[in-house]
Amino acid sequence: MTSIAIIGCGVVGATIAYELSQNPDLNITVIDQNPLAVDTSSELINQNSNLFTPNSTKAALGVLMGIISQKTKGRAWRLRQYSMQRYETLIPELEAATGQNIPFNRQGILLLCYAEEELGKWYQLINLRRSQGLELEWLNPTEIQTRYPQINTKPVLGAVYSPNDRQIDPTQLTLALVEAAQQRGVTFQWGVKVESLEPLKTPETQQVKTNVGDFNFDWVVIASGLGTTPLISSLESETLPKKPIKIRPVLGQALQVRCIQPLGTLGLEPVITGNDVHIVPLGNAEYWVGATVEFPENDQEILVNSEPLDLVLKGAIAMCPALETATILKTWSGLRPRPEGIPAPVIGNLPGFSNILLATGHYRNGILLAPATADEIRQFIQSN
C-alpha cells in the first residue's frame, strides 16, 4: 500500500486528503501543528476558530469568483472551471456523508462597476462566457435598484451578475472534509509539528521528522502555506533552484455584523462585491464584510492595524448604506500565503524530488482552487 503524508490541514490539505481517500490503495496521514478543537459546534468555531483553522483558511470569506473572474484562458481558467464544477457535486456529497449542513450560497455574485474605463473588459467577459455556455448578465443602475434596493446606485455605472458563482463557509467546509476523510480511513495527527524532511537512501522514500518522532512515507504533499519555505529550506539537493520558492504572508482582516433587518429581499441575497470589498450574507440579517489586503514592509512582521479594516467597512457602507447602523459582532484576521516572483498557486513536484509534491501558495484563492488542486495532486500520484 502506498503511504502518503499531507503536511497542513487547511482547506487545501483537507480537500486533498478527502479526494485521495477515494483510492483504497493509499494509506494517508495528515499532519497539522494546530490542535483540533474537541467541540466543533458553530459557537466554538466562532469563538475559538484559531484552535484548529490554519491562518489562510481563517482569513478567507469563501467567495468563489470563478466565472466572473477575468482569468479567461490557460491554467488559471482551467483550475477555476474545474473547481466550480466540482463544488456542485462536492457539497451534497459531503453533507450526505457527514450529516452536516455546509452553508453554500447559491445566489451568485453581483459585482458593481464604478470605473468607465473598465466597462469594456466586463462587456468582453460577458460575451466570452456566453460563448462558453456560461451565464453572466449586465445590469444597468435602474435594474440594480429594482432587484437590489439595498445598494447605493448613485456612483455605480452598472453591475455584472454571475448566477453560477458561489460562496461557502470555509471552516465548516474544512471540518466536513476532515470528517468525511476520517470515515474513509485517513489518519489525522493534530498538534504535531513537522521539523524537517530528510531524503532516505532509498530515493522512493521520504522521512518526515516531527516533534513526536520520525516517519517514512512514499509521498509527501506540502500543503502548509506559509510553512512551505522552511520545509523546503531543510532539504539539500543540487537540483533545487538557486532561488528557492518563497511564500510570503499577506494579512487579511474581516468582520461580522448584524443588521436590524436583512439588506436584501428574502431569498435574493447574492454576495455583493465592488472596489475589492465583499459583503457576504450569512442569514438572520448577519454579514461578513472584508477583506483587507495588507503586505509586509521589508519582510517585517505584519501587525494587525484597525485602520485598513475601518476603510473596508466604510467601503461596504458606501455600497449598502444600511450597514452604517449594523452591530459589529466580531473581527478576525489571518495570513494568506503568496508566492514571490511566480504565479499562484504552486502545484507540482518539488524540483529534484520526484516524491515531494507542492500544493501551496494559493494567496487569495485557496478555497476557490482547493478542488482543482486536489485533482492535480491525485493525477501526479496516479501517474507515477
Image (cartoon, grey):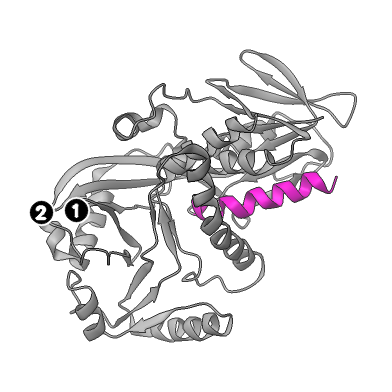
Residue at the extreme top of the image, as rendered = 212
Report crowding for label 1: few under 14, some 14 to 19, many 20 or more residues within 10 A (C-alpha).
some
Residue 292: percent from the left, percent from the top? 34, 52
Q: Which residues are magenta?
A: 365-384
Q: Quadrant of the C terminus?
A: top right
Residue 341: percent from the left, percent from the top? 61, 55
Q: Secondary structure at mark 1?
A: loop
Instruction: Name the amino acid, label 1.
Output: Ala
The answer to whether 344 is drawn above or below residue 202 in the figure is below
Give the residue at mark 2. Answer: 260
Determine which quarter of the picture holds residue 280: bottom left
Residue 245: percent from the left, percent from the top? 66, 45
What residue is at 39 percent from the left and 84 percent from the top? 119
Q: Which secondary structure type mostly characterizes the magenta part of the structure?
A: helix
Q: What is the distance, in whole Å, between disc 1 and disc 2 at their CAs? A: 7 Å
What residue is at 23 percent from the left and 61 percent from the top? 316
Report crowding for label 2: few under 14, some 14 to 19, many 20 or more residues within 10 A (C-alpha).
few
The answer to whether 160 is drawn above or below residue 216 in the figure is below
Residue at the extreme right of the image, as rendered = 202
Q: Quadrant of the N terminus?
A: top right
The question of residue 375 being in magenta is answered with: yes
Closer-to-camera residue (163/139): 163
Q: Is residue 156 visible?
A: yes
Give the residue at mark 1. Answer: 285
Mark 1 vs 2: CB contact within 8 A: yes
Closer-to-camera residue (201/112): 112
Determine which quarter of the picture holds residue 153: bottom left
What residue is at 32 percent from the left and 65 percent from the top? 270
Instruction: Name the amino acid, label 2.
Output: Ile
The answer to whether 275 is drawn above or below residue 361 in the figure is below
